[in-house]
Amino acid sequence: MREWQQSRMILLGTLLILCMGAQFGFVGCGQTATPITSPATNQVYSYFSGPFNVPGSDLAKSASTFDHAAKQIGVSSFITNNNAQVPTAIINGTFGTAGTGFLQITENFATTSSGVIGAQNPPLTGAWAVEIPGAGALANFLSVNSSSASGASVRAAPAAMAENTACPNFSNPVPFLYVTVPDATPTLTAHAADYGAVNISTQGSAVIFNAQPFLIGPLSQAPSTVTGGCSNTNLGALTAYPLNSFGNPSNLELIGIGASGLLVSSFNTGGSGASAGAFGGGTGVVGMALPSSPVDVAAVVSAKYNGFLYAPRNTVSESYDITVLASAFGDNTAASQACSALQSSLAANNGKGAGTVPVLPSANSLYGGEFLTTTNTATANDPTGAGVSENCDVVIDLGIQDPLVNGSFPNATVFIGSNYPPFSTSHPWNCSDTGTICAVAFPVAAVVGKVQGQYVILLVASGTSVPAARLPDNFGNRAAQPLGIYLFQKTQ
């Protein structure tokens, strides 16, 4: 442990060599991203969408607009046509605010499996988003798979978005924290990093990324320094890496850096070669500006959040897309009746050996879970329906904040209870190897910060860490697979 701490201090010191005279670590180094003040007269917000490369979805590199005056939403993306990338509208619809705080999205036009937008009659429902207006959003849109032999079906696709109206202008390095997103490729067993910190600076249109990635453990990976270039494009002001790779179908990475402090990147696995990208992770990332001081953990865990859980390699067969689960955290506490099944399963598996629950959640924990209805439809996990509420089957234990890096929680833990899908309180998860009630705990890394006064929590778990992240399958097995959780604090 001492060797790791010394190594990390050297690496972080290298990253921040330009911050002479600053306190050691990322605290107080460089300039702070300027918060956006939502304009009273202009309620149309533009975002760059990424970084979830979902098969059959064009959302990984797209631009979205949320028009709060007209309550309309539009999404456009680059479609490859004759080896050229052409910007094309792929979704158009309306939105309103549901009682849960999610935006309820209706798609009047949606992309199909042919890549062409088509009118939907009746309009598609079940899409949703959470937004920090003017800063960014987390969303789950819908597309139509018209090539299915059994008829057209609706598939879901997640997106994380950051404001894209201007290129960054950082004369001094600005520090960001980020998590890499789980890769949907089933054959990918390992990747370059799970999370990290990056200093971003600019020289004219050039954008320099000085990154220090980590694997969950935490294990330092090799630091990197690469340069991309920012331009105003059909998808907004974006940074391309490598430099001068705009308009190339094999472009490795497109990066949106919002003035509010949110950051997203879309990683092209087909064009990556041996490169780990601008952040050293080998996949897309979601991040935020590093807090200027340690975050108040008590305030973080006492707040309420909306967002989603993303497990792209979850192969459980359900009537809804179990890989993307709309979720809420903070409405329930450890003592809530809604959490009793979760708590009972954690206690039953506490100290029972490998792959179970070695310790119980600490006071630095958030309780929550996904939204599910009893309706057997593709939109069963719709958080915008009347009278819906979230389950309590997941615990996020942030643990101790890194004393060297504000907002970084490298030794956090996630707990999954016996009522996690495809199981429930009435039909609990029984471990296939023991036949008794099941629950698991595994290490994760989390980063926490504030964007326009709202807490943002980003979390990553790895299917290859020791112990690995595990979720239940249909047979009660503890299936090793990666997991991401992305949450925005609710304002109401």
Image (cartoon, helix red, strand yellow):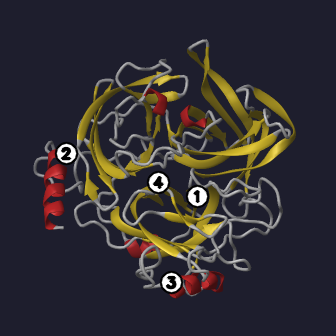
Amino acid type of the residue that numbered disc 2 sits on in the rendered structure? Leu
Residue drawn 50% across and 44% down? 187
Element under disc 1: strand
Q: Is residue 159 left or right of residue 216?
A: right
Instruction: Give the labeled residue for mark 1.
Output: 307
Residue drawn 63% across and 83% down? 341
User: What distance separates the C-alpha of mark 2 from that of mark 4?
Assistant: 26 Å
Mark 3 surroundings: few (<14), some (14-19) or many (≥20) residues within 10 A: many
User: What distance separates the C-alpha of mark 3 from that of mark 2?
Assistant: 42 Å
Q: Position of residue 7 (x, y in %)?
A: 15, 56
Judge by depth and name the residue closer to the eye, 257 or 126: 126
Instruction: Give the labeled residue for mark 2.
Output: 15
Instruction: Give the labeled residue for mark 4.
Output: 452
Q: Reading the chain from its start, which is encountered first: label 1 or label 2?
A: 2
Q: How many marks?
A: 4
Q: Position of residue 455 (x, y in %)?
A: 46, 61
Residue 349: give its label.
Answer: 3
Q: Reading the chain from its start, which is encountered first: label 1 or label 3?
A: 1
Nearer to us: label 3 or label 2: 3
